[in-house]
Image (cartoon, rainbow, N blue to C red):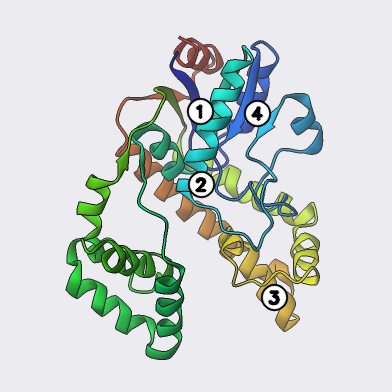
Amino acid sequence: MRIPLITGPTASGKTALVLSMAEKHDIEIVSADAYQVYRYMNIGTAKPSEEELKSVPHHLIDIMNPDETYSAGIFFEQAETVIQDILSRGKIPLIAGGTGMYVQTLQKGIFDAPDRDPSIRAGLEERIKSDGIETLYGELSSIDPEFAAGVKPTDPTRIIRGLEINTQLSMNVRDAQKKYHRNPKYEYNIAILSDDRQKIYDRINRRVLTMFEDGWTDEVKRLLDMGYSPELDSFKAIGYREIAECLRTGTNPMSVCERIQTATRNFAKRQLTWFKHMDDVRYIDLSDKNYIKNTEEFIFT
């Protein structure tokens, strides 16, 4: 069977739609969200509530501590394993989430290179501290200009990864991706929720305000009190570092509310751009009163 998958920009109503389908279909939900995997990060990641999580089985939520690293490669491995398990029990796996890279990974496959050499990564991380990120970006641009062209000069994660691949595998990233590509096990019916952009932006603005009202600041404070650093990858989730900085400086966290709203709207733009470059998908118009029926007819065929 083709696996049903629902995605779309943040605040497009994915969770509500999927939960409504769980009332009529024998499904289990597999999350495709880069930050809902982290424990203790509930409000700012718009994680389903405890009641919602109990109403239907969910997978790949609350599986990592905030100081652990998650990636598209880990997601791909875990998602395919979970999908196989759900199918073996006669249930329907429904993938739901807005991380476009994760969705595309399921659809297109993954870069399955040999295990990383920790000494190479550690050396590159030390060199960023000693020589500066600009120096390493210059080296990446010199040895792998094609990959470097798609990397921000201030993105240490991708700069290190590019240099790591070139060093360990003695080939550029593009050639490595061709040699070590792993095809997916399954095919997917991918529904992308679509709505008037201003409506999505309005929902984003309201959602961010609601997050603050629901105790987002206290959630960030608890994370810091537990010893989790704002420099962790998990804190890249929009809003967490901004609120953490307010707590550090004694600034009213509500002072960054507008900045977080803007960042979230910009993130939604990037999501929409990503979806435009995906093949074999169906857009679902949320302004159509029959959008739930239209979605079901497509993804469950």
- Helix, strand or loop status at disc 1: strand
Three-letter code for the amino acid on which mark 4 is drawn:
Ala
Q: Is residue 53 above or below residue 63?
A: above
Q: Above or below — where is 290 with respect to 250?
A: above
- The type of residue carrying mark 1 is Ile
Q: Which residue is mark 3?
A: 246
User: Looking at the picture, how far across and down is residue 94, in whole percent?
Assistant: 56, 24
Real-space Cα separation, disc 3 to disc 2, in angstroms: 32 Å
Between disc 1 and disc 2, the foreground one is 2
Is 98 situated left or right of 19 in this image? left
Determine the CA span between mark 1 and mark 3: 35 Å
Residue at image coords 38%, 74%: 154
Q: In front: 273, or 51?
A: 51
Bin the neighbour count of mark 2 within 10 Å (Cα to Cα): few under 14, some 14-19, many 20 and up: few
Percent across and percent down for residue 300 are 50, 12
Residue appearing at x 68%, y 68% in the figure: 243
